[in-house]
Image (cartoon, grey):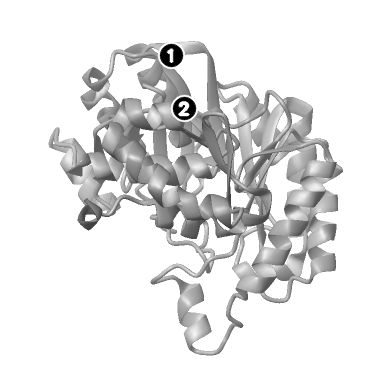
Amino acid sequence: MAGIYIHIPFCKQACHYCDFHFSTTLKRKPQLVQSLCKELLLRKNETSETIETIYFGGGTPSLLTEEELEAIFEVIYDNYTISPTAEVTLEANPDDLSEEKIIQFANSKINRLSIGVQSFFDEDLKWMNRSHNAEEAINAVNFARKYFDNITIDLIYGVPGLTDEKWKENLKNALQFDIPHISSYALTVESGTALEKMIEMGKKKPVDDAVSKRHYEILVKTMTEAGYINYEFSNFGLKGYFSQNNTAYWMGKPYLGIGPSAHGFDGKHRYWNVRHNILYIKAIEEGKIPQTTETLKTSDRYNEYIMTRLRTIWGISLPEIEEKFGEKYLAYFQKEADKLFENGFLIREKDKVRISENAKFLGDGISADLFYVEESF
């Protein structure tokens, strides 16, 4: 068992681009924390393996109080086998990160902070409807560096109005902190979000894919020249500081998903909890886990393997395809990959296949070209 993911479904306000499950009403937070603890107890027999990562995502986990965090950690460490070197990450918003709050986190089991900076420009943060400003972002990272060695920040590119020069300045600002990891994502317009509606109504400009591609190329060049390894499409880390939680996901390791809307994986099945705080709390109080389970076919697992591995520097292992999925899938992959080798989108190095540098931004489409389609055989 690679890890435990805990979803904290609360935020101070809604970012326009976000489609994650959360509530801006915090009155049920104490009750929900109790339910998280109970779900951890209900699921404790699902694995006897050592837990290598614990990840608090959301939502905004930095809204948890010291007592709430302690209650969750007590249940985890009393009922699961935790590696002494486990990576324990908490996502945090800059406006929550006073020096006092960071000291509180540093005195807990947390050893890695993920700070949702998104931009160092106030106009971008207002456009996204973030709850912090640029000054708070700078102060939060400076405070965090005093008490944490392992820090990552998030940045978003492709925002309408974000020029190439402003994007370069964002990266320059990020690099001045000497933090060991940066995650950077293209702004996407998710279905049902406020951003989608605003674009449809003409209140916001649409996202330009050409601008996003150009920003990504600037991102890769800047981070690589600064000594960071682009070990996954959106992630850049110094040696020894790759996200263990995310790496486990890309490598297909199983994990428990705890909390409303949380997803989990046991190697052959994916499950997800109900996306509703009240229904989640009610079910857990009754001793039931409100989840939907999907049994993955071999083709599903193969497609997920292709999709996740192509995003990483480790790429696809031909012997591993044969071992995990059989000769038929290896033959299928080799047949479908031939044309991608010819046009330079894929590169083969002995028994490994990875995406070429100039094709990274096309990765999702390239993965889709390699997906197993039932009618093909």
**Do labels 2 and 1 touch, CB within 8 Å?**
yes
Q: Give how far across and how far down residue 262 sits, in percent.
A: 34, 43
Q: Is residue 149 left or right of residue 370?
A: right
Q: Give how far across and how far down residue 174 sits, in percent.
A: 79, 47
What amino acid type is highlighted by mark number 2?
Ile
Q: Give the mark count.
A: 2
Query: Which numbered disc covers residue 226?
Result: none
Question: Going 47% across and 30% down the picture, which residue do you hit?
Answer: 248
What amino acid type is highlighted by mark number 1?
Ile
- Residue 28 shows in the view: yes
Q: Which of 12 and 322 is in front in this view?
A: 322
Quadrant in which the N terminus is drawn: top left
Q: Name the residue under label 2.
A: 54
Q: Give how far across and how far down residue 370 sits, in percent.
A: 40, 51
Disc 2 element:
strand
- Residue 11 shows in the view: no
Question: Going 67% across and 49% down the picture, which residue do you hit?
Answer: 357
Disc 1 element:
strand
Question: Going 21% across and 41% down the picture, which residue do you hit?
Answer: 297
Q: Is residue 162 left or right of residue 11?
A: right
Q: Name the residue under label 1.
A: 82
Q: For mark 1, does the 10 Å Cα neighbourhood hold few (<14), some (14 to 19), or many (20 or more) residues? A: some
Using the image, determine if residue 11 lies above or below residue 323.
below
Using the image, determine if residue 191 lies above or below residue 20.
below
Q: Which of 189 and 79 is in front in this view?
A: 189
